[in-house]
């Protein structure tokens, strides 16, 4: 079973160049989670995201 099979919407987070705070802000606005909760779950350093439905407005 894959993540896509279990969840309709998800985001893949990997090391990258964008600041964690910027990524956390985008995810919190799109998902309704608090920015602090998202920020705490991100890896250290910069991040990159691949969106699989969370950021897209339906």
Image (cartoon, grey):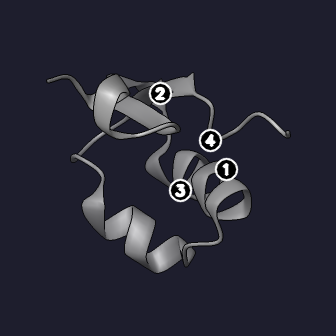
Which residue position is annotated with label 4?
54
Mark 1 in CB contact with mark 3 (< 8 angstroms): yes
Q: Is residue 35 above or below residue 29?
A: below
* Secondary structure beneath label 2: strand
Cα–Cα span, label 4 and label 1:
10 Å
Mark 2 in CB contact with mark 1 (< 8 angstroms): yes
Q: Is residue 58 above or below residue 48?
A: below
Is 30 on the left or on the right of 33, as rendered?
right
Quadrant position of residue 11: top left
* Secondary structure beneath label 4: loop
Which residue position is annotated with label 1?
26
Cα–Cα span, label 1 and label 3:
6 Å
Which residue position is annotated with label 3?
24
Mark before the other along the chain sequence, 2 or 3 = 3
Q: State which mark lies toward you, 4 or 2.
A: 4
Query: Can residue 11 be seen at all in this image of the molecule?
Result: yes
Is 14 on the left or on the right of 53, as rendered?
left
As rendered, which of 39 and 52 lies closer to the eye? 52
Mark before the other along the chain sequence, 2 or 1 = 1
Mark before the other along the chain sequence, 4 or 2 = 2
* Secondary structure beneath label 3: helix
Residue 6: x and y in percent read: 30, 38
Tell me the residue at 62%/41% (across/down).
54
Tell me the residue at 67%/50% (across/down).
26
Task: For label 4, count other residues whose C-alpha is less than 10 Å away and answer few (under 14), some (14-19) or many (20+).
Answer: some
Mark before the other along the chain sequence, 4 or 1 = 1
Task: For label 2, count other residues whose C-alpha is less than 10 Å away and answer few (under 14), some (14-19) or many (20+).
Answer: some
Q: Which mark is residue 49?
A: 2
* Secondary structure beneath label 1: helix
Q: Is residue 56 above or below residue 22?
A: above
């Amino acid at each position: 079973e894959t993540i896509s099979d279990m969840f309709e919407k998800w985001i893949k987070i990997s090391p990258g160049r964008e600041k964690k705070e910027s990524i956390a802000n985008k995810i919190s606005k799109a998902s309704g989670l608090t920015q602090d909760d998202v920020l705490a779950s991100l890896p250290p350093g910069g991040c990159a995201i691949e969106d699989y439905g969370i950021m897209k407005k339906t």
